[in-house]
Image: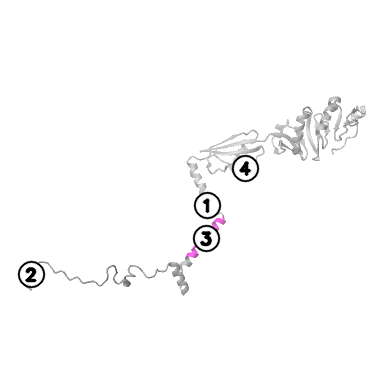
Amino acid sequence: MRQVKAQSRTGVRAAPKKKSSKIAPGKRRNASAMSTFGRRRERPAGPLALWFENLREGNFGTRPFTMGAVALIAGVIVYGIVIGGHAQAAVDATGRQVNRVLALSGFSIQDVTVTGRAQTRKDDLLAAVGVDRGDPIFGFDTEAARQRIERLGWVRSATVTRLLPDTIRIEVSEREPFALWQRGGALSIIDAEGQPITDEGVQDFAHLPFIVGFGAPRETPALLNLMRAEQPQLLQRVRAFVRVSDRRWNLRLENGVDVKLPEMGVGKALADLAAYDTKYKVLSRDIVSVDLRLPDRVSVELTEDAAATKGIATEAKTKNGVVRPGGAARGGNT
């Protein structure tokens, strides 16, 4: 006993005996007990599965219904905003605010330059542009301005562009005045396509050909082009082109003589008239009208004084018959 106590005082203990294991090497102890260690036997149910389980058992939670109601209300609000146009209004309002800020930064309209303007009045053009000095340049609608400018009578086409930071440039192509058109008691300037330009300032275009009657603007270009090409001297003596029943023309000459042209074969009738005038000076005589409506003859109507004093005028033969200018009574336009 003394010997054992002495050893314990020194701090040395005897090693315990190692118990022998009955488990074969390479095998885990109590495998059935360790099979569930660190994991669960079944995966827990998710929120959706729990909701369906509660629904099956009759336990209705309010949270899904609340979320559904909130989503429905939000959808109705968005739909109302889009259909009612409030979304676009909000976007437009935001754009206007941004443009105002940019205008304060120097992007504002200070100048409007115009090229190609000759007849269009400056005030009318500026009114069509529709801008004031200091307006935001990014808020200016160039396409809308172009459409307004092209509605002006003299303007054929226009181009409107921005020149940053502060200039609007307008390029104008104007119509060419072609003739003066009388309809009823009004006068209009028309272009070469027969389109009316304006009713204002017609006194400045008294040198243009004068046309009268319904349908005259549409048919005038063809007649004028024909006379310019084949009878330029006769064209210079015409004071007015009168459209009769929208079928044919009467030419009112500067001396008051009316030349009645046929519906068809106008070029040949004008050529015959020029030939008769060259040979017989028909258009310089004391006559009222020359009727070219019949293809085989030319009828000349004398004035009342000429018919009473001179009787029947000279005769002239044509290819197809005899021309007998006489003092027949003046008939109406047909």
Q: Is residue 264 magenta?
A: no
Please, which residue is most extreme toward the front here? 24
Which sits in the foreground, 243 or 112?
243
Secondary structure under tag 4 reads: helix
Dominant secondary structure (helix, strand or loop) of the stretch shown in magenta: helix
| Residue depicted at 62% across the width and 42% down the height | 148
- Coloring scheme used: one colour
Say which label, 4 or 2, has the lower sequence index.
2
Report helix, strand or loop for mark 3.
helix
Q: Is residue 131 left or right of residue 227?
A: left
Badge 1 amino acid: Ala
Calculate the distance from the C-alpha at mark 4 to the C-alpha at mark 3.
39 Å
- Label drawn at residue 147: 4
Which residue position is annotated with label 2? 6
Q: Position of residue 134 (x, y in %)?
A: 52, 40
Q: Nearer the viewer, residue 122 or 329?
A: 329
Q: Quarter of the image containing the C terminus? A: top right
Q: CA distance from mark 2 to mark 3?
A: 91 Å
With 86 as the anchor, is 252 left or right in this view?
A: right
Rendering coords of residue 112 (x, y %): 56, 36
The percent coordinates of residue 128 (x first, y second) are 61, 41
**Judging from the image, what secondary structure is the residue with disc 1 in?**
helix
- Choose mark 3 or mark 1, whichever is in front: 3
Which residues are the magenta region? Answer: 67-84
| Rendered location of residue 136, percent (x, y) | 52, 42
Q: Assign the N terminus to one quadrant of the image.
A: bottom left
Residue at mark 1: 90
Nearer the camera: disc 2 or disc 3: 2
Indicate which label's residue lies in the foreground, 1 or 2.
Answer: 2
